[in-house]
Image: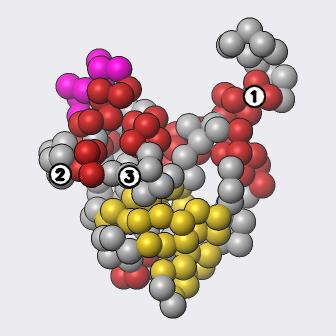
Amino acid sequence: MSHTITGRTWVIGDSVDTDALYPGFAMRLPVPEAATHVLYDLRPGWSAQVRPGDILVAGRNFGIGSSRQVAALLRHLGITALVAEDFNSLFHRNAINHGLPAVTVPGVSNLVTEGDVITLDLEAGLLRNADTELAFSPVPPMMLEILDAGGLLPRLVAAGYLADPSGKG
């Protein structure tokens, strides 16, 4: 995985909880079908507008609530990164464990508007939007390894801590 990500932005507000991201009625559905309901109440039809490579930008307390596996749905839609003023810690960890980069960037709500094309440099800790940059804490090497592997479970398989579920390893 490249540690530099460029994509078109979708901007949502503060305190978006996991119920809004992944409605309860969709939790029994297979991932492809459940993904069509992401942000269903806040932005009906949003999932049909997402293109591979898009980046979701949020305000404060992104992902508060339960530990629903929202990252799998966002990855299925083609979202390549999450940026927020701050995340619920459990949500943040779930995103990384599913191989979805999630970076905390204070001030991002004042810099990015919907449809902007931004670039994230995960190693340097820089967000670029047009002629402006915002610094954030670089993603630690261990987290980059997890992201590079496509998530925590693939990383543990690659390191020999878990059996390869495909039976190839």
Q: What distance separates the C-alpha of mark 2 from that of mark 1?
A: 36 Å
Which mark, residue 42?
2
> How much space separates mark 3 and mark 1, taking CA atoms?
30 Å
Amino acid marked by disc 3:
Arg
Judge depth for marks 2 and 3 and give the one in front: 3
Of label 2 and label 1, which has the lower sequence position? 2
**Residue 89 shows in the view:** no
**Residue tagged 1:** 156
Marks 2 and 3, how far apart at CA: 18 Å
Q: Residues within 10 Å of mark 1 (few under 14, many from 20)?
A: some
Please identify the dominant SS of the magenta region: loop
Q: Residue 51 got which mark?
A: 3
**Residue 81 falls left or right of residue 48:** right
Q: Position of residue 2 (x, y in %)?
A: 68, 56
Q: Residue furthest top?
A: 167
Q: Which residues make up the magenta segment?
A: 23-30
Task: Locate the C terminus by quadrant.
Answer: top right
Q: Secondary structure at mark 1?
A: helix
Q: Amino acid at mark 2?
A: Leu
* Direction from residue 133 to residue 150 in the image, left or right: right
Residue 44 picture location, percent across and down: 15, 47
Q: What's the residue at 29%, 27% (across, down)?
A: 33
